[in-house]
Image (cartoon, rainbow, N blue to C red):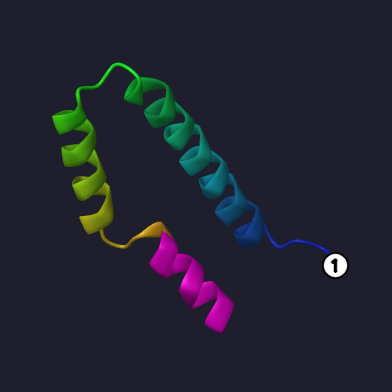
Amino acid sequence: MQATGELIRMMNYVDDIAATVRRIHVGISGMTPEERKRLADYMRSSEPSFVKTLEMLDKG
């Protein structure tokens, strides 16, 4: 199946998200437990969330 320009653009966004998550992952080791908790809470409350977006994709 051939990919449209829009699909390729969206896939590039996912690559950008993955690069950001890798940066976060590397930085976690230098954080205090309080900072890790605060970051986790912040990530959970972000909208739209990555998990909710995946759910939308799965529903069609």
Residue at the image position 20 percent from the left and 47 percent from the top: 42
Residue ID for mark 1: 1
Residue 50: x, y in percent?
Answer: 41, 58
Of 40 and 58, which appears nearest the observer?
40
Residue 54: x, y in percent?
Answer: 50, 67
Identify the residue at the far front of this view: 33
Identify the residue at the far bottom of this view: 59
Residue at the image position 27 percent from the left and 48 percent from the top: 43
Quadrant of the frame with the C terminus: bottom right
Q: Is residue 33 left or right of residue 51?
A: left
The segment highlighted magenta reads: 51-60
The image quarter in which residue 47 lies: bottom left
Quadrant of the frame with the N terminus: bottom right
The image quarter in which residue 36 lies: top left
Q: Is residue 7 left or right of residue 39?
A: right
Q: Secondary structure at mark 1?
A: loop
Residue at the image position 26 percent from the left and 55 percent from the top: 44
Q: Is residue 57 magenta?
A: yes
Badge 1 crowding class, 10 Å Cα cut-off, few under 14, some 14 to 19, many 20 or more, is: few
Q: Main secondary structure of the magenta part?
A: helix
Residue at the image position 35 percent from the left and 20 percent from the top: 29
Q: Taking 35 as reference, is 37 above or below it?
A: below
Identify the residue at the far right of this view: 1
- Is residue 46 visible in the rendered structure shown here? no
The image quarter in which residue 23 lies: top left
Amino acid type, label 1: Met
- Is residue 18 visible in the rendered structure shown here? yes
Of 7 and 32, which appears nearest the observer?
32
Residue 46: x, y in percent?
Answer: 25, 55
Residue 19: x, y in percent?
Answer: 50, 33
Q: Taking 42 as reference, is 48 above or below it?
A: below
